[in-house]
Image (cartoon, rainbow, N blue to C red):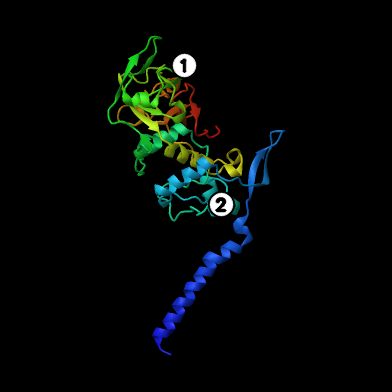
Amino acid sequence: MNARFVALVAGVGFFFLALITQGVLPLVEPSARSTLVTAVIRTDLGELKWVRTDATDYTPLQLSGRQVYLREGCWYCHSEYVRPVTGETRRWGPVSEAGEYAFDVPHLWGTRRIGPDLTRVGLKYGDEWHFAHFWNPRMLTPDSIMAPYRGLFDSPGAPVRTAGDRSGNVTLEQTPVTTKLFDFSSKDQVKLTPNVDGLLFIPIAAQGKYPVIWTPNEEYTGDRVKLAAETKDLEALIAYLQKLGTNRGKWRDLFEPEQLEAGAPPCPARMNGSTSAGRFMSGAAPAATASTATAMGLPLPSCIGNGRAISLWVSSNSASPRSLFRPTAP
């Protein structure tokens, strides 16, 4: 018996061993098909409790978004698994359970974290935040190395002029591009607010309605805007991201991954053009933040109370800012 024959037998043997352990055993292992997860619920008395429940499957829209996620290679840089090691729960939330992956074929645990883990990203941010993030991640995170995904938008190359209508509102000039996106004869109006650079995100829900350029605080004073319309692929991708982690219920009410014992970063002494925030707000009083928060493009830090920072985001058709990150307790 020579060494070549031994190597051949060993190679074939290890091949079938890998096939059995990686392909056959996972199919017959009961835990691989379990949909049970622990989730946080709020009782009628307002108490938060962990209960055993079944994970829910993806909707057709979310499944379509998962395919976009795979197609764009998002899983190369983002993991979807909170590991049972020190620090993971403080940063991402509760440790992942087998039932959360019952409907994932294939699973998208990933191999490394060039970007943050996305297991618990669902409902952490609004859809408008994702619009800005996919258009240009550095609008929200200046140090981000993520590439823009502007191919997920329907965006004409040339800016579109704004114009007044008979009702005194500011709308968009009727061109082949705008008439494809909007119905200028519709009585159903939608208010859209561009950011300070004139970038106007158009959700699918706003398409087919009469556009009104709404700038109550003079967020943008130019006469041309650049359109970035949401596509079906982007709608599906955001729906998939908003699903992640929701099988664990109201876990955010028990976990505070963004809360650090080291304390919140201090507010900058100056807010001027040299800082990213300085483009959107003066360093005056916190009250100025709400008036400028509708400038979609960056989450705006505001100095509140003892120097705690809150990131604010405002929907393109809403004047009320909502907090994305809850402040640490004083």
Q: For numbered disc 2, what is the local secondary structure? A: helix
What's the distance in space between the residues labelled 1 and 2, CA to CA?
Answer: 45 Å
Q: Which residue is at a point 57% across and 62% down the rendered structure image? A: 26
Residue 166 appears in the picture as rendered: yes
State the image coordinates of residue 186 (x, y, percent, origin top left).
44, 18
Left or right, 141 with respect to 38, comes to left
State the image coordinates of residue 17 (x, y, percent, origin top left).
51, 72
Q: Which amino acid type is marked by label 1?
A: Lys
Question: In the orientation shown, which residue stands out farthest toward the bottom?
Answer: 1
Question: In the orientation shown, which residue stands out farthest toward the right?
Answer: 45
Q: Which residue is labeled 2 in the image?
A: 101
* 277 w.r.t. 219: above or below: below
Mark 1 or mark 2: which comes first in sequence? 2
Residue nearest the observer in this picture, 181 or 245: 181
* 104 w.r.t. 257: above or below: below
Residue 196 appears in the picture as rendered: no
Left or right, 53 with respect to 102, comes to right
Q: Count residues near mark 2 (Cα–Cα under 10 Å), then give few for <14, some for 14-19, many for 20+.
A: many
Question: In the orientation shown, which residue stands out farthest toward the left?
Answer: 158
Quadrant in which residue 140 is drawn? top left
Q: For numbered disc 1, what is the local secondary structure? A: loop
* 133 w.r.t. 271: above or below: below
Left or right, 223 with respect to 10, comes to left
Quadrant where the C terminus lies?
Answer: top right
Tag shown at residue 176:
none
Quadrant where the N terminus lies?
Answer: bottom left
Q: Which residue is labeled 1 in the image?
A: 187
State the image coordinates of residue 64 (x, y, percent, origin top left).
48, 43
In this rendering, which labeled residue sits more in front, label 1 or label 2?
A: 1
* 250 w.r.t. 199: above or below: below
